[in-house]
Amino acid sequence: MTGRRDVKRACDQAEVLRIFDLRAIEDVLARASGRHGAPMLEAIIAAYRCGVTLRRSEMQQRFPAICDAASIPGPEVNVWLALRGGAGFTPDFVWRRYGLVEKTDGMRYHATRAGFQRDRRCDQALMVAGWRVVRFTWRQVFHEADQVTATVHALLDQHLRRRLRFVVAPTAQQRRPRTNGP
């Protein structure tokens, strides 16, 4: 008998090896109704369905709703950010005032080798240009909204604290004690 942990580990390893076939497993599960182990495999496979059939627009509709519910300032959506050298990107969400870019990553577009490499190049170019980049997964956006909002709040607050530190930090002359006379 194989336990849940072993089955999950086998699924994870199959995904790493790029031999994981969700449709084939779903076909087997459709024929295995009532068989021992089918409910366990169904529960494990449910995690792999997350983000697979989700259209980009659905995740992008959900994220602003999370921001609104948490009183997070509304980001710009799908705006072109031109960078030096003619390069640029269209991140999912941008808070210009805070220097923050957010990307919502579903498995369909970001789990391929090309997508993985493209995401890293994009993040690096944005960071070199002075942007902070945060990525959230489908699961986080749809099932861990509290953690998403806590992270965004913290990042926005960090930016404001850094700006205030530079605005109110005393200059070297202001730190010197004043004396009367020469």
Image (spheres, rainbow, N blue to C red):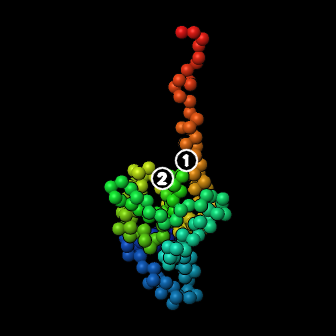
Image: 23 above or below 171: below
Q: Residues within 10 Å of mark 2 (few under 14, many from 20)?
A: some
Image: 2 above or below 168: below
User: Hey, which quadrant is residue 153 in on the image?
Assistant: bottom right
The residue at the point 43 percent across, 59 percent down is: 81
Image: 41 above or below 82: below
Q: How crowded is mark 1: few (under 14 residues within 10 Å), some or many (20 or more)?
A: some
Q: Name the residue under label 2.
A: 132
The residue lying toward the viewer, choosing from 13 and 3, is: 13
The residue lying toward the viewer, choosing from 67 and 174, is: 174
The residue lying furthest to the left in this view is: 85
SS category of the residue bearing label 2: strand
How far across and down, in percent of the image, does residue 133 sit?
47, 56
Q: How many labels does the image show?
A: 2
Q: Name the residue under label 1.
A: 159
The answer to whether residue 44 shows anywhere in this view is: no
The answer to whether residue 126 shows anywhere in this view is: yes
How far across and down, in percent of the image, does residue 152 sit?
58, 56
The residue at the point 52 percent across, 74 percent down is: 57
> What is the CA distance from the residue labelled 2 to the residue labelled 1?
10 Å
SS category of the residue bearing label 1: helix
The residue lying toward the viewer, choosing from 115 and 122, is: 122
How far across and down, in percent of the image, does residue 33 sit?
56, 88
Q: Name the residue type under label 2.
A: Arg
The residue lying toward the viewer, choosing from 45 and 58, is: 58
Q: Name the residue type under label 1.
A: His
The residue lying furthest to the top in this view is: 182
Q: Quadrant of the C terminus?
A: top right
The residue at the point 59 percent across, 17 percent down is: 178
User: Hey, which quadrant is residue 64 in on the image?
Assistant: bottom right
